[in-house]
Amino acid sequence: MQITLNGQLQNIENSKTVADLLEELQIAHKKTVVERNGTIVIEEFHEREGLMDGDRIEIIHFVGGG
Amino acid sequence: MLNIGNMTFESNLFLGTGKYKDAKTQLQAVEASETEVLTFAVRRMNLFDSSQPDPFEQMDVSRYRLLPNTAGAKTAEEAVRTAKLAEAANMCDMIKVEVIGCDKTLLPDPVETLRASEELLNEGFTVLAYTSDDVVLARKLQELGVHAVMPGASPIGTGLGIINPYNLSHIIEQAEVPVIVDAGIGSPKDAAYAMELGADGILLNTAVSGAGDPVKMAEAMKLAVRAGALGAEAGRIDKKFYAQASSPLGGLSI
């Protein structure tokens, strides 16, 4: 399955859900927010939010700023 | 004591988390400042670089009220999206609406700032609007219902201090919500001066993170904000053109 992940085309083989994807990327332990096709997927829905070919996934986090 | 929305703060100093040389220095500076509010930014994660620093790596964020900014937004829509992302991660007690309209000065776009503030107020956010030192714009933001106005002392990161104390004084005089002076603070005297003018608080970042000794500067800013607030409460003397002796003129022995 091919998705656009933070602006880059990526082949994802092992992830069926948002939760799987965060595990595959080894960032499940980090504080992040996920958007799937422009809509926020809150954490409690990560396990049931399925991924589909062509999805646009954005993974957002928090950085230093003023 | 500072009240914003339904929150109350003992400290009048809000601190940004950008540009510290390392996490340990940031942690110590935050401690030394005794701030209760931390500001930070919301960004797309760089998934292909695991070395990215996490500003809250060693921090217990539950001890602080979190004030993410919408920096990076150039339109109201982008600012609203950023705020919603922060809220979805439970990282948003208040939102700093920051919509930049000029790349050179980083001055805010007044129209987009108003639009973003209105939308976020409708969505139930506690909105702190970063604005220029424009008196009318500050009033319009207040009329919209923002929970605090945050006029810049001078452009972000310049350290030029308060370049228009006249405008700032008018913003403070007309304010019915807290005025947090945000951006441009260079040294403790600027923070003290803003508080003496009657500001309710100070938000700064580079003045501490970029200082020679950020931890010491954080403490200096804490004391300056306190000194300025006390001075404003105490009421300063009028300025006079001619000298007025402090010692009595009578009883001279010579």
Image (spheres, helix red, strand yellow):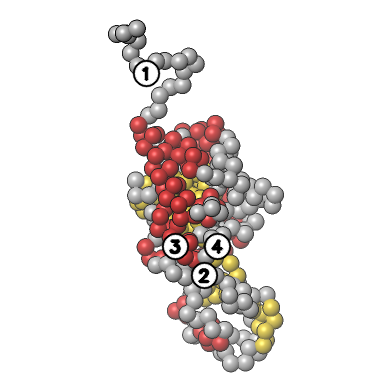
Looking at the picture, do discs 1 and 2 lie on one chain? Answer: yes
The numbered mark, 3 or 4, whose residue comes first in the sequence reads: 4
| Nearest to the observer: residue B233 or residue B244 | B244
The numbered mark, 2 or 3, whose residue comes first in the sequence reads: 3
| Nearest to the observer: residue B250 or residue B191 | B250
Q: Amino acid at mark 4?
A: Lys
Depicted B73 relative to depicted A56: above or below = above
Q: Amino acid at mark 1?
A: Ser
Q: Residue at x 39, y 60 (%)?
A: B64
What is the spatial separation of the Cα atoms under label 4 and label 2, in whole angstroms? 12 Å
| Nearest to the observer: residue B46 or residue A59 | B46
Looking at the picture, do discs 3 and 1 lie on one chain? Answer: yes
Q: List the residue tagged with mark 2.
A: B54
Chain identifier of the residue bearing label 4 in the image? B
The numbered mark, 3 or 1, whose residue comes first in the sequence reads: 3
Q: List the residue tagged with mark 3.
A: B27
Q: Residue at x 50, y 81 (%)?
A: A28
Q: List the residue tagged with mark 4.
A: B21
Q: Residue furthest left?
A: B251
What is the spatial separation of the Cα atoms under label 1 and label 2, in whole angstroms? 55 Å
